[in-house]
Amino acid sequence: MNLLAIETAAAVCGVALFQEGKLLDLEEAGLEREHAEKLPQFYRGVISRNDFHLRNLDAIAVSIGPGSFTGLRIGLSFAKGLAFAADLPLVPVPTLLTFGAGLDTGDAKVKAVLRSHKDYIYYQDFTVHGDTVVEKGTPVSSRWEEMLRQVSNGTLICHYGCDELIALQAGDHPYEAVTPSAACVGELAISSFDEWQQEDFRTLEPDYISHFKVGSRKKAV
């Protein structure tokens, strides 16, 4: 499968190009409030460097949330534009699940955590079995302290943007910092393509979790 993956859910803006299911090129950077400018540049970069065109792609994947409201809107709008232009299916990928795709832990219980603002976070539970990430619940918005009370023994907390919160209150838990990546978005999109792909995505909305009314999305296994 040839696929283009987009990540804009947090400070990282990235585009990954997959050819026959393998990562071919990746361009990403940690940016603040520059996604609208940099995303088209990154897209043109990976496409031109590899002599690819939209007609060479089989699908577009995008990190669907939760995360930055502005970043999610930018990423999904750009992904929809590409998919509409080439009549391609769109694959919405749950952002917190991509944290698990980037782990090298073997079998593990994981709580993925993404900082929102102040002490508010998004989190989701899942298990990792080799290369397989399995959801154990839906994403939740809460305060950091409330999340810590929900952590069971032996659970790894993988997080992005939570260093200050950990310094204030860590609890007796193992932590691993992760960085959102378009490469992980693409990997999950390919492995779950049959379940997640949407050919009619006109009403698809980001998975905001809080403050916005959320449209429905397909649930992972």
Image: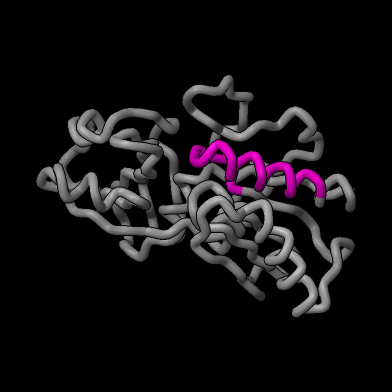
Q: Quadrant of residue 144?
A: top left
- Residue 65 lies in the magenta-colored region: yes
Q: Where, quadrant-wise, is the N terminus in this rendering?
A: bottom right
Q: Where 158 falls versus 212 (above or below)? A: below
157 and 40: which is toward the camera: 40
Q: Residue furthest top?
A: 213
* Residue shown at 72% from the left, 70% from the top: 20
* Residue shown at 35% from the left, 44% from the top: 113
Left or right: 64 as drawn, with respect to 140: right
Give the magenta range. 63-81
Left or right: 93 as drawn, with respect to 118: right
Q: Where 66 falls versus 16 (above or below)? A: above
Left or right: 184 as drawn, with respect to 6: left
* Residue shown at 77% from the left, 35% from the top: 201
Q: Position of residue 218 (x, y in %)?
A: 61, 32
**Magenta-highlighted stretch: main secondary structure?**
helix
User: Can residue 191 be seen in the rendering of this structure?
Assistant: no
- Residue 157 lies in the magenta-colored region: no
